Image: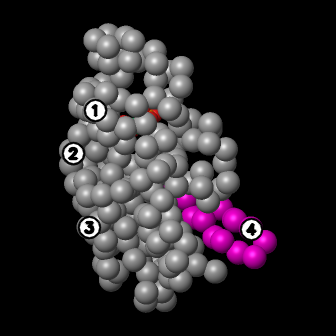
Amino acid sequence: PRPILLTRHGESRDNVRGRIGGDSVISDTGELYARKLANFVEKRLKNEKAASIWTSTLQRTILTASPIAGFPKIQWRALDEINAGVCDGMTYEEINKNMPDEYESRKKDKLRYRYPRGESYLDVIQRLEPVIIELERQRAPVVVISHQAVLRALYAYFADRPLKEIPHIEMPLHTIIEIQMGVTGVQEKRYKLM
Ligand code: F6P
């Protein structure tokens, strides 16, 4: 059975500063992860000629994929991080201070809360539908390099987790979640590369 490998991008400059959204490049630590990931993928998928690497359209995922050699890379806008609208580029602390009502509404119902001029988790889940259909259709392995909120939603789909849990699923940096779909159900392995 073909594996699906899910990973967040390597640590970004905005991750270091605690800023959400944006389109920053990866940090030195993030670059180290990119090299380790390439090593891992090239070994793990050595005999998988038809495998492919899927990223979002944001720099941090494209840069994370860049050291991986030997597989086609495809960019999906649907894999871009949740759009934080007017809060894009802010820290959680700044949102709490400058827009306390927004901060509270999100805390109360993170699944349904929609950032002003941005998205909710439910919006993200909906826009991922074509990606999921395409993932299900693939016969070869796929490496998905995306973002925290998007990967929570994708992971929940394959691991059959309830909707209300999605915004709270732990999705650490620098970790690969390997999902295998077999006849007996879904199996999962985790590789923490750093
Ligand atoms: O902080 C990294 C990040 O990917 C942000 O860009 C995004 O807004 C956030 O995580 C999503 O996580 P949460 O829904 O927990 O705020």
Q: On the picture, is 7 further left or further right than 136? A: left
- How crowded pointer 1 is (Cα within 10 Å; few <14, some 14-19, many 20+) is rated as few
Mark 4 touches mark 2? (CB < 8 Å): no
Between disc 1 and disc 2, the foreground one is 1
Disc on the earlier residue, 4 or 2: 2
Task: State the residue in front, 49 or 99.
Answer: 99
- Asked whether the beta carbons under mark 1 and mark 3 sit within 8 Å of each other, the answer is no
Residues under labels 3 and 2: Cα distance? 16 Å
Q: Secondary structure at mark 4?
A: strand
Local crowd at mark 2 within 10 Å, few (<14), some, or many (≥20)? some
Residue type beneath disc 1? Arg
Would you place residue 94 above or below residue 26 in this image? above
Is tag 4's residue or tag 1's residue first in the polypeptide sequence? 1
- Residue at disc 2, secondary structure: loop
Q: Position of residue 129 (x, y in %)?
A: 48, 59
Q: Per the image, is 106 magenta? A: no
Q: CA distance from mark 4 to mark 2?
A: 37 Å
Query: Of callouts 3 and 2, which one flags the residue occurring earlier in the amino acid sequence?
Result: 2
Q: Which residue is mark 3?
A: 66
**C-alpha distance separating marks 1 and 2:** 17 Å
Q: Is residue 193 visible in this depiction of the protein?
A: no
**Circle 2 is placed at which residue position?**
23
Depth check, front residue: 31 or 117: 117
Residue lying farthest to the right in this orientation: 184
Which residue is label 1 attached to?
117
Indicate which disc, 1 or 2, sits on the residue closer to the N terminus. Answer: 2
Numbered tag placed on residue 185 in the rendering: 4
Q: Label 3 neighbourhood size at 10 Å, few (<14), some (14-19), many (20+)?
A: few
